[in-house]
Image: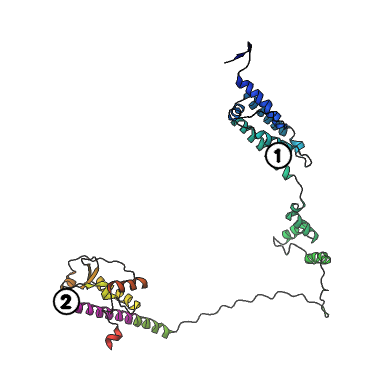
Amino acid sequence: MKRTRGGGDEESPRQNGSAGRRKGNQQQDDGDDGGCAIGPPDLQDEDNDPGLRREIRSKYRDLINSVTQNREDMLSPSNNKLTEVLQEAVKLFKDVRQPREAALDAHLLVVATDLGNEKASQLFTEGTTFDPTAFSEHLLSFMGLNRLEDDEDEQQNGGAVDGYLPQDAWHRVARRAECCFRTSPSFHYMMGSFHAEPPPPKQRIERQRKAPNKEAKRIMPTQLKKMEDSNQEATEKEVERILGYLKSYYQDDPTSPISYYEFVIDPNSFSRTVENIFHMSFLIRDGLARMYLDNDKLPCIAPVEEGEVDTGGSYSRKQCIVSISPKLWKELIEAFDIRDTMIQPPNTQND
């Protein structure tokens, strides 16, 4: 809508306000504040002003075209045009409000970055001009390397080359470099020098293996067999001895269950406890003893009657793995209040 004031046609207050604000902003940039205050509605009108938006986009396109057309001139180290373009882009970016303007700013940044990267790669720095490959080639040439002669020698010798460099190659380098260092005079032999040659490789003498003695062949298996028999006999005797303890405790009071932990744990020796658990496993494996849980779900142990052993028993055999550590051993001793062992050690029994 348009309003008439004084009988004349005038633009809407929004357009007049936008034009007045642009003039007011220019006056504020020059340092002259004309006494006008800009509020949030005025800033919103600037963001939506199509003329100002077109002007910003046009400036961005001019900067992009300037970088593209003057690319060769900007690559010169003495040319600072790229810096001026970036400074102008920073000023324009303050008025960017819409996605199209931001896209142009990003495009300008990509073009300027590529140009700056190419310009930086053309800079000359003495610290980065050292080429190891070129240096090695110059050094080999100074030391007297001739690749053509090496190729001919290789063809004559059937592919075998005695050496890449002459014999005095390193002497040439030493004579050239000795002027750069303060060194003491070199040592000279009064009676002449000698050329040390590497010692000839020693021939490896294979030692003859001694034939094993017939008597050793005959004796060793016998000794091992006796050792195995003795260990097996000791284990069987210990299993039978523990079975005797189990039967005697069970016969004293058949109605009272025997706790497994109280039976195998020795409160004075952790190693004896492990041995008792090991030997008890043979009794359970062979069906001479059985384990069950009491009313408190604790493991108990009891001997198996002779008739059940002969016939295989009326229960199913099951095996499990029992683990114990010194910490668990001490906790079981405190939990079951074990003061003495139920299985006396063999030496105590003999005494």
Q: Which mark is residue 115?
A: 1
Q: Amino acid at mark 1?
A: Leu
Quarter holding the C terminus is bottom left
Kindly check if marks 1 and 2 are in contact, taking CB atoms under 8 A apart as contact. Answer: no
Q: What separation in Å lies between label 1 and label 2 (alpha carbons)?
A: 101 Å
Q: Is residue 245 magenta?
A: yes
Q: How is the image coloured?
A: rainbow
Answer few, some or many: residues within 10 Å of disc 2's Cα (few below 14, many 20 plus, some between 14 and 19): few
Residue reaching furthest to the top: 7
Residue 59 % position (x, y): 69, 29
Residue reaching furthest to the bottom: 351
Eyeballing the image, is 344 above or below 130? below
Residue 251 % position (x, y): 17, 78
Residue 282 % position (x, y): 27, 73
Residue 55 % position (x, y): 67, 26
What residue would you read off at disc 2?
Answer: 253
Q: Amino acid at mark 2?
A: Asp
To which quarter of the image does residue 56 belong? top right
Q: Residue at x 26, y 75 (%)?
A: 263
Q: From which residue to which does the magenta span run?
A: 228-254
Q: Which of the two labelled residues, at mark 1 and mark 2, occupies the earlier sequence position?
A: 1
Q: Residue at x 75, y 46 (%)?
A: 123
State the residue in front, 167 or 130. 130
Quarter holding the N terminus is top right
Residue 92 can be seen in this image: yes
Image side of residue 118 versus residue 308, left or right: right
Examine the residues drawn in magenta and state their main secondary structure.
helix
Residue 287 can be seen in this image: no
